[in-house]
Each structure stands twice: as structure tokens, then as C-alpha cells.
Amino acid sequence: MSLKSIELQIAIPKTFEAGKIAEQKQQQSQIDQQHANTLTEKQVRKNKESVLELAPYAKLDANAKRPNDQSEQQQNEKQEKEQQRVNHPFKGSFVDYSG
């Protein structure tokens, strides 16, 4: 297949344009990948910092005693004591050794 001089005048510049477009697409994909990596790293750092920031508050809330919590604890203790006092219907205090 032979190309005429007029066809070459059109074909050669288009190959340069195609090469430039391919290079730009490749660079754009690399830039997008780097951007995604930086966003991921920022998110990981943010998650790590947020966990560290929340930990002291969680400890304070767990150790803090409120009046309502104390009354609930007292009620729970009373219920546990009542349950311990109730005799079990199948368990008895007599042990039969004659067997």
C-alpha cells in the first residue's frame, strides 16, 4: 500500500496527536491513582486520630456514676439477692447417701 504525499501530510500530524492523547491519558490515570492513594491515607489517619480522641471520653463515661445509675445498680443487687433466697423447686437441702 503506497501513500501519496497529500495523504502523508494528513497522516503524520495525526499520529503525533494520537501519541500526545495516549500520553495524556496515561498521565491522567497515574494522577488519579495518586490522588486516590492520598485520599485513602488521609482517611486512615483521620480514623486513627478519631479513635484516639474518643478513647479518653469513653473511659470517663464508663467511670462516671450518676444517681440514676446507682439506683439501678441497687435495684439489680436487690433482685439478685431475692433470686438467691428463693428455693429451687427441684433442688433440695437433703442429700441421700444411702444408695
Image (spheres, rainbow, N blue to C red):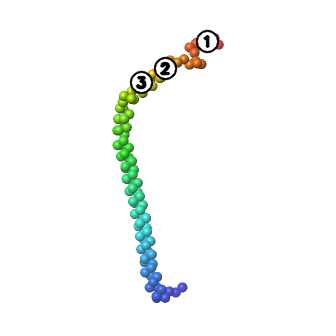
Residue 95 falls in which quadrant of the image?
top right
Q: Are marks 1 and 3 in contact (CB under 8 Å)?
A: no
Task: Tell me which numbered mark, 1 or 3, is placed earlier along the sequence.
Answer: 3
What amino acid type should be assigned to the residue bearing mark 3? Gln
Question: From mark 1 to mark 3, how far is it between C-alphas?
Answer: 41 Å
Q: Residues within 10 Å of mark 1 (few under 14, many from 20)?
A: few
- The residue wearing badge 2 is 82
- The tag on residue 74 is 3
Establish if 92 lies above or below 1.
above
Secondary element at tag 2: helix
Q: Nearer the viewer, mark 1 or mark 3?
A: 3
- The tag on residue 97 is 1
Q: Which residue is more in the foreground, 65 or 39? A: 65
Q: Nearer the viewer, mark 1 or mark 2?
A: 2
What is the x, y in percent for residue 10?
45, 83
Identify the residue at horizontal 37%, vertical 45% (top origin). Answer: 50
Q: Residues within 10 Å of mark 3 (few under 14, many from 20)?
A: few
